[in-house]
Image (cartoon, rainbow, N blue to C red):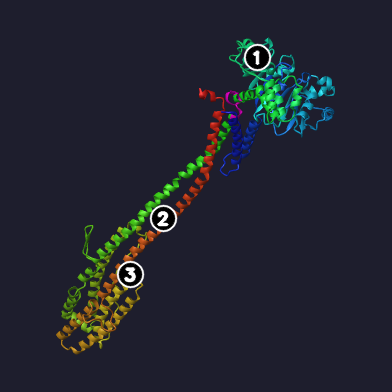
Amino acid sequence: MNIEQHIAHRAWAFQALDALEVFLDDPDFVGDKEEEARIIGRKRRELKEGKYRVVILGEFNVGKSALVNAFLGEEYLPMVLEECTTKITHIIKSDDMRVVLNLSTPVSEEELETLARLVAACGVTADVLAGEDMNQVVIAFPSNQGRDLVRTLRPLVTLTADEDFPQLRSFRGKFDELHIYLPTDLLADDVALVDSPGVHSISETNNKIAEEIIPNSHLVICLLDSQNPGTEHNREFIEKVVKHRHRKVMFVINKADQLNEDEIDPKGHRGPAKDLFRSLRGVVESPEIFFVSALYALVSSQLSRFQTTLEDLDGNNKIKIPWALQRELMLGEDPAAGVAEYLMEKSNITTLRDRLLRYLYTENREGAILESACRFIDEKAWTYARPIQVQLDMARDVPRLAELNEQSEILSGEIADGARRAEAVSSILQDMSGGGVLLNGREYPGYEKLLDSRVTEETVQRAILDPAREWLCDDLNYKNAKQNGFTPLAAKVESLAGAFLQNLYRDLNLEVYAVEDTALTKMGASCPSDPVRHDPFETPGIQIQKLSASLAGSYFGFIIGGAVLGAAIGAGTVAGGVWGELPDMNMALQMAAGAGAAAGVLVGLVLRAATAKSVVRKKLTASIREQVQQLILGSKKGIAAGRPAAIKGQLREALLLRRAEFSDYIRDAFEQASQDMRARLAAILEEEDELRRKQEEIIARLEPKLADLAELGGRAVETAQVNGPNEIETIA
C-alpha cells in the first residue's frame, strides 16, 4: 500500500462513519440512537484527532526545528542557535493556524493581557483567548502566515526568552508543552510531529520526553549532526529508547550539505554512517540511516513560494551548487524553479518523508488508528445489519403463507370435489328415484314404478271394490245399509279406501325416505346440518254428513263419492304439507270434492230406478267401481269438467315434483357449500396476496440496506487488513 492509498482509505473511513450515523435515522435501525451517535462521534474524533506521533530527538543545534520546517515547507519554528526550542512542541495539521497552551495553573488576567500586548508589539495580528477555567490559552492567527507564528513563539519557547522577554517569565513556567495547528498540505492529516529540546540536558522537560512522549510515540527520529554522529551520549540515549521503550528509531544525519559525495553512505561503509554503525553495534541491528539537508529543503520550498530569491542565495555561503550546474540552471527557462528542484533533490527530504509515512501506515504495530476505525466500522455495520437480516429471514419465511397456501390447495380441491360429488349425488338421486337400481344391497324400484305397481285396476279391485261388493252381498249388511240410508256401506267403502291409500302412502314414504336419506349420506360434508326432510303422506279422516231417508239412494251415491274423494283430499292434504307452495294442486283437490258430490247424485238417481235387490246391488257395485276408479286411477276418457285429477296422477306429479325439488335442494346445498368454500378461498387468497405484498415491500426495503451495510463492513475489513499491523504477518 502506498501513501496515496492510505490517504484515500482514511477519507473513506470518514465517509463510512458518516454513513453509519445517517443509518441511525433509518426506521429499520434497532438500538439506542443517542448512544450509538455518541459512540460514532467519539470514533470520528479519534480518527480525526488520533495521530501517528513522530518524535524528533537530538542535541541542541543539531537542526530539529529546521527539520520540522523542512517537512512543513515553511519557517514556522525558530531555528537560530539562540532561539532553540525549550518546550515540547506538537505540530498538527488543521484548517487554521493557532497555538494551544495547556497550563498547569490558571493564567491570570494580567499575564493574558501582557501576552496579548507582546504579540501585538511583535507586529503580529492574533487573537489571544483563554478558556473558561483559564487553564488553556489559544492564540489564533487569521493570516495563517508562518512569520507570525515564528514571532509569537520567540517570547514563549526560545532559549533566550527569559532574558529577552522577562515580563512573560511567570507565564512560561506554567507550560512545558504547546500544540501548533497548521494549514499545510505537506503534513498528513493523521501524523503529528513532536519537536523536542536538546535531549542530553538534564531537566524536567527531558525527563518528560523520556517518560511520557517517547512511550506514546509511534516512531522516533534521532537527528544527528553530520560532523559527529557516533557519540557515547547518542548511544546511551538510543539504547534507552530502543531497548526500554521498544520504539522504532530512524537515524537522520542532518547537514549533509556539508559532506562530500563519497561521505554520504547510508550503508555505513564509510563516512559518518560508518561511525554511527560502530556506535550502535549491539544496540540496533541494521539501522536505517538517512542523510538529509534541512537547509536545502527549506530553501527549496522558499524559492518555490517566492519567499526568497536567487540573489538572496548568492549571499548564503551554506548553499553550494557546482559552478557548471549552476550555470546550466541559470540558462534554463525558470532558473529559480530549476535551483529549487535541485536543492530539494539534494536535501533527500522527500525520501525521508515517504519512508516515514510508509512505516507508520504499513509497518507500525501500535496505535493503528485507521485499522481501529475500520474494525469499528465493520463491527457496527454488522451490528446494525443483524436486526435487518432477522427481519429479512422472517419476511422470506412466513409460516402463515405456507398455511394459507396449504389451505387454498385443500379448498380448491374440495371445491372441485364438491362439483364432482354434486354431479354424482344428483345422478344417484335420479337413478334411485327412477328405479331399477341396486345400491348397497338394496333395490330401489323408483317413485313412478312403485306407484304404478301399487295403484292399478287390479289393486283397487282387490283392496276396495271386491271387499265392498262382498260386504254388500251379505243380506244383513244390505238390509242394515238400506235401513240407514246406505250410510254403513259408505263407511265401509271409506274404510277400505282409507286402508288402501294408507298402505300406499306408507310405501311411498318409505321409498322417498330411503332415496333421500341415501342421497343425504352421499352428500357428506356438503349436507347442511338441518337438511330438508320429506314430510310423510298422511290419510286424513273423512267426515260424512248425516243423510235423510227419502234421499237415501242419492245420499248413498254422495257418500260413496265422498268417501273416495276424502281419500283424494287426504292425499292432496299430504301433498300440500310437503309441497305447500303448490296452490294449483290444492285447487284440483277441491274440484275433486265437487266431482264426488255430483257422482253421488248420479248414483242416487240410478238407485232410485232400481227396484230389485240384485239390480240394486249390481248397479251399486258398478257405480262404486266407476267412482273409485275415476277418483283413484282416473278415467280413460279424461277428467270430467269440475272434477279433480285422479289421486294417482296427483301423486305422480307430486313425486316428480318432489324429486325435482330435492334435486334442486342437493344442487343448492352443494352450491351453497361451494360458495362458502369459495368465499373462504377468496379470503385466504386475499390474505395471502396481502402478506406477499407486505413481504415484497419488506424485502425490497431491507435488501438494499443490508447490502449497503454488508458492503460497508466488507470494505472496512479489507481496508483494516491493508492498513493494520498484521499486514506484514499476512504477507510473510
**Nearest to the observer: residue 469 or residue 421:** 421
Q: Which residues are magenta?
A: 359-370
Q: Is residue 382 left or right of residue 155?
A: left
Percent across and percent down for residue 371 are 58, 29
Element carrying mark 1: helix
Mark 2 packing: few (<14 Cα in 10 Å), some, or many (20+)?
many
List the residue tagged with mark 3.
Answer: 578
**Nearest to the observer: residue 489 or residue 450:** 450
Q: Is residue 367 magenta?
A: yes
Percent across and percent down for residue 496 are 22, 74
Q: Is residue 677 left or right of residue 606?
A: right
The part of the image, by quadrant, that contains residue 603 is bottom left
Position of residue 144 relative to residue 635, above or below, is: above
Element carrying mark 2: helix
List the residue tagged with mark 2.
Answer: 681
Identify the residue at horizontal 57%, vertical 35% (top origin): 380
- Cα distance, mark 2 to mark 3? 36 Å
